[in-house]
């Protein structure tokens, strides 16, 4: 078995890295968090690298792998391939984001929802919480877990909503000054601009 030479390994790295950078930037810009296998990542990176090398070859005149290998680390060439990698991922990612993925964002849906609600509604923020016990509680958000914390809620001025069989509100029973609802008890949230179910 013949091991690849250091030069062969370097050529493979030269071929894959620009595409890998572009693919990662594309995924970040478009909020695409689908986990690719190592094989798929390598294939996409190689294909993207080949597309990146077309303008690189046209701009530099380096028309074969030996020339590219020998001069890729020269400052002007390294800057150009870096710019093409970042530009390809950024431009194509922005295009796809604007056309097809406007509503996709990085991060937790919970945090995104809370941020969007805070932008649209004036404080205080009210919410109807549906629980695993089929209870419906309306109240003002006093505190909520964020980031890597549990998404627990603390509601101020909570009321238990009791409905008739036709789903109209029969009564709102006060539950004290505040109520703590752990994340595992929440099945659905409805954000409100005023405290009515």
Image: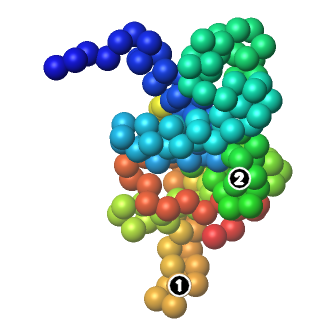
Mark 2 surroundings: few (<14), some (14-19) or many (≥20) residues within 10 A: many
Is residue 108 visible in the rendered structure shown here?
no
Residue 195 picture location, percent across and down: 70, 62
Q: Which mark is residue 167?
A: 1
Closer to the camera, 193 or 7? 7
* Residue 49 in sight here: yes
Dot 2 or dot 1: first in sequence order is: 2
- Mark 1, Cα crowd under 10 Å, few <14 / some 14-19 / many 20+, is few
Image location of residue 164, percent across then percent down:
50, 85
Q: Quadrant of residue 39?
A: top left
Foreground pick, 83 / 191 = 83
105 or 161: which is nearer to us?
105
Query: For mark 2, what is the residue?
Result: 97
**Residue 132 x, y percent position in the rendering:** 36, 61
**Residue located 60% across and 12% down the image:** 70
At a point 47% along the width and 32% down the height, the residue shown is 149
- Count of picture labels: 2
Decide which of 113, 86 is in the foreground and name it.
86
User: In the rendering, at what x and y percent does residue 65 appear?
Assistant: 56, 25
- Image quadrant holding the N terminus, namely top left
Indicate whether 171 appears above or below 30: below
Q: Quadrant of the C terminus?
A: bottom right
Q: Is residue 138 left or right of residue 126?
A: left
């Amino acid at each position: 078995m013949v091991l690849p030479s250091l030069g062969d390994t370097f050529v493979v790295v030269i071929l894959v890295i620009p595409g890998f950078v572009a693919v990662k930037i594309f995924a970040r810009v478009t909020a695409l968090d689908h986990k690719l296998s190592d094989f798929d990542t390598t294939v996409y990176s190689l294909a993207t690298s080949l597309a990146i090398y077309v303008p690189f070859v046209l701009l530099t005149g380096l028309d074969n792998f030996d020339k590219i290998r020998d001069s890729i680390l020269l400052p002007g060439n390294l800057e150009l391939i870096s710019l093409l990698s970042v530009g390809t991922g950024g431009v194509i990612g922005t295009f796809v984001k604007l056309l097809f993925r406007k509503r996709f964002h990085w991060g937790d849906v919970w945090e995104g929802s809370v941020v969007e609600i805070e932008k649209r509604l004036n404080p205080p923020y009210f919410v109807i919480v549906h629980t695993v016990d089929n209870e419906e509680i309306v109240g003002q958000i006093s505190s909520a877990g964020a980031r890597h914390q549990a998404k627990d809620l603390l509601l101020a001025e909570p009321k238990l909503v009791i409905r008739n069989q036709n789903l109209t509100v029969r009564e709102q029973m006060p539950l004290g000054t505040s109520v703590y609802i752990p994340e595992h008890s929440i099945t659905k949230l409805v954000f409100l601009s005023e405290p009515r179910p």
